[in-house]
Image (cartoon, rainbow, N blue to C red):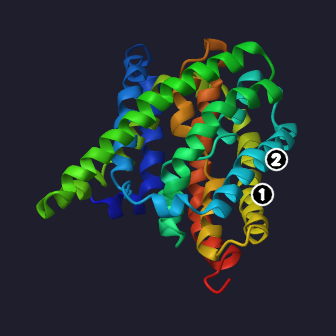
């Protein structure tokens, strides 16, 4: 039931089904779905724990020592892409919640499922794993600064700082530590390896629970914002195209091999929706549309990653590059 390869093969269909079911449930019994919002924190934590158990956390030192790759990943994600996001804001509707949602989800690089896509796309998974904690620390520090510069307002920056710190402690640091000790415990006896295989089947269904809960709890907001989806789809698709091309430009500048260039492409193209979701859910009610923006971006990104799995290894960074 929880075979990772089966879930990954049909994950887009699973997420779409979960959203549709959530919307139907939220429409049918809107007064009884509020409790689902309270389940998001523990489900997100379990999601990241099971995700982290699938990466070799004990083998980071060699990849982390590659300063050229780290410089390229940091430059692209935290210097160039924020400028690109600022330019894309000219395409966004003049709605505060929409703009805030776009900024939240596009300014911070992914720290979890981009590792899976890097692996599937033939990239250097060790470098992807090594960059993940560096990326987390930088986005925690820089997101309030980005929001101050791009969105403006003390409130947005203050909330981002508090909630990102809480998300890091509860949804990243704790699951990461638990995953590390789980892997150490499994490594003590060969017969325990099956536990990691079982855990590997949980990330996709857990994410389905997350998007189901959000769709059910936010059905009213979703129905009122259908007209915005075309604008959002345009922004997110343009971002994906630019992110891939940016990786193709930056990798040669830092003299990176094709495997590391693929890591850059998947890192630039994927965003950290898991971590910013709790932040968006904590916003005041007049900004709740930001949650819809973040979930919709995740769906566009998943479809985009399916295209990336063909585009990145075959066109952007072929094996003989």
| 164 relative to 105 in the view: left or right | left
Can residue 24 be seen?
no
Residue drawn at the location 52% of the way across and 45% of the way down: 133
Image quarter of the C terminus: bottom right
Q: Helix, strand or loop at disc 1?
A: helix
Residue drawn at the location 36% of the way across and 57% of the way down: 7
For label 2, count other residues whose C-alpha is less than 10 Å away and answer few (under 14), some (14-19) or many (20+): some
Query: Residue beneath label 2, please?
Result: 84
Quadrant of the rendered image containing residue 207: top left
- Residue 125 horizontal/vertical position (percent): 49, 64
Tell which of 215 and 146 is nearer to you: 146
Q: Are marks 1 and 2 in contact (CB under 8 Å)?
A: yes
Of marks 1 and 2, which one's residue comes earlier in the chain?
Answer: 2
| 197 relative to 35 in the view: left or right | left
- Residue 301 horizontal/vertical position (percent): 60, 51
The vertical placement of 154 against 311, above or below, is above
Query: Residue beneath label 1, please?
Result: 242
| 115 relative to 56 in the view: left or right | right
- Residue 297 horizontal/vertical position (percent): 62, 43
């Amino acid at each position: 039931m929880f075979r990772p390869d089966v879930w990954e093969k049909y994950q887009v269909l699973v997420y779409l089904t979960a959203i549709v079911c959530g919307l139907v449930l939220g429409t049918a019994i809107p007064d009884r779905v509020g409790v689902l919002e309270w389940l998001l924190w523990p489900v997100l934590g379990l999601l990241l724990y099971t995700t982290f158990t699938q990466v070799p956390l004990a083998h980071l030192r060699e990849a982390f020592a590659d300063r050229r790759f780290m410089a390229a990943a940091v430059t692209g994600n935290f210097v160039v892409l924020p400028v690109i996001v600022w330019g894309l804001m000219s395409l966004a509707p003049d709605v505060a919640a929409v703009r805030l949602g776009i900024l939240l989800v596009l300014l911070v690089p992914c720290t979890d499922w981009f590792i899976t896509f890097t692996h599937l796309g033939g990239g250097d998974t060790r470098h992807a794993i090594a960059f993940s904690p560096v990326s987390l620390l930088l986005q925690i520090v820089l997101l309030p600064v980005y929001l101050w510069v791009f969105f403006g307002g003390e409130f947005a920056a203050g909330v981002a700082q508090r909630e990102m710190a809480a998300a890091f402690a509860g949804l990243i640091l704790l699951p990461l530590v638990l995953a590390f000790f789980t892997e150490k415990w499994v490594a003590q006896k060969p017969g325990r390896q099956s536990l990691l295989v079982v855990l590997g089947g949980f990330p996709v269904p857990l994410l389905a629970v997350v998007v189901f809960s959000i769709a059910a709890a936010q059905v009213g907001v979703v129905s009122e914002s259908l007209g915005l989806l075309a604008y959002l789809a345009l922004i997110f698709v343009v971002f994906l195209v630019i992110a891939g091309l940016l990786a193709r430009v930056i990798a040669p500048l830092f003299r990176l091999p094709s495997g590391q260039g693929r890591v850059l492409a998947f890192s630039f193209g994927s965003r950290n929706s898991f971590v910013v979701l709790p932040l968006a859910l904590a916003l005041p009610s007049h900004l709740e549309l930001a949650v819809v923006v973040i979930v919709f971006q995740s769906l566009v990104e998943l479809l985009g990653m399916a295209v990336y799995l063909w585009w990145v290894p075959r066109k952007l960074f072929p094996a003989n590059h």
